[in-house]
Image: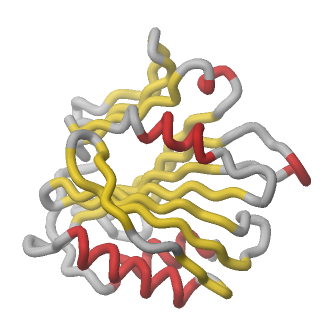
Amino acid sequence: MKPRYSATLALLAGMALACARPLNGPDDQPITEGPAGRTYTNRSLGFQITVPKPLDVSWGLSVQTLHHTGVLADGTSLSVYITAPRGRAEFQPTLTLDPFPVGRNATLADLGAQATKDFAANYRNYRESAHRSVEVAGGQGERWTFTAQTSGRGDRYTVTLVLNGRLVYLIQGNGIDGYYPTDAYESILKTFKFL
């Protein structure tokens, strides 16, 4: 299991999961092209994200639905992948977005603390920066960076957690020395919005 998946699933293990709306509602839209770039909209999970121009020419956008993890009420999980072009040593930085249901009393601080424990348990030589508050989609988020030893997934990461009602959105970008497109990740995060 890739470190990101094991850490993400471990993040959920410590949380009280609540029912979420079905994943594939009638209002969900496929990836669309528009004047602002390439956009993925998921009304049932309440978010939209865009690969803005000019990144949309060279960056990929895909969505994967897994039917075996049982994270959401209908027994599925969803991951949005936004990939940069391959670069040094054929490495391909990836920004992922994973929405998860959380308990009624979950707080951003508690989720950030739980994520830190889970990442530390799942990444070798985990070293993180201080968590800080950021504004995402008009609300508060928590962000931190960390370095770790992994095989093939990069060695540095940026994590942003955003809480909206009973859903938390875990957004994680990776990189390596010399190819860690944090400015591009930031421009993509600025497009993230709640529906």
Colour treatment of the image: secondary structure
Identify the residue at the far bottom of this view. 121
Give the residue at x 52% y 30%.
51
Q: Position of residue 134 (x, y in %)?
A: 33, 53
- In the image, 134: left or right of 172? left
- In the image, 178: left or right of 4? right
Identify the residue at the far right of this view. 89
Quarter of the figure with residue 82: top right
Q: Position of residue 166 (x, y in %)?
A: 15, 61
Q: Position of residue 44 (x, y in %)?
A: 22, 42
| Total marks in image | 0
Identify the residue at the far left of this view. 104
Give the residue at x 59% y 38%.
184
Q: Quadrant of the C terminus?
A: top left
- In the image, 161: left or right of 121? left
For this rendering, which residue is in front, 131 or 191? Answer: 131
Res 76 seen here? no
Res 61 seen here? yes
For this rendering, which residue is in front, 95 or 43? Answer: 95
Give the residue at x 57% y 71%.
146
Give the residue at x 66% y 65%.
156
For this rendering, which residue is in front, 104 or 160? Answer: 160
- In the image, 159: left or right of 155? left
Quarter of the figure with residue 68: bottom left
Q: Quadrant of the N terminus?
A: bottom right
Q: Position of residue 174 (x, y in %)?
A: 63, 58
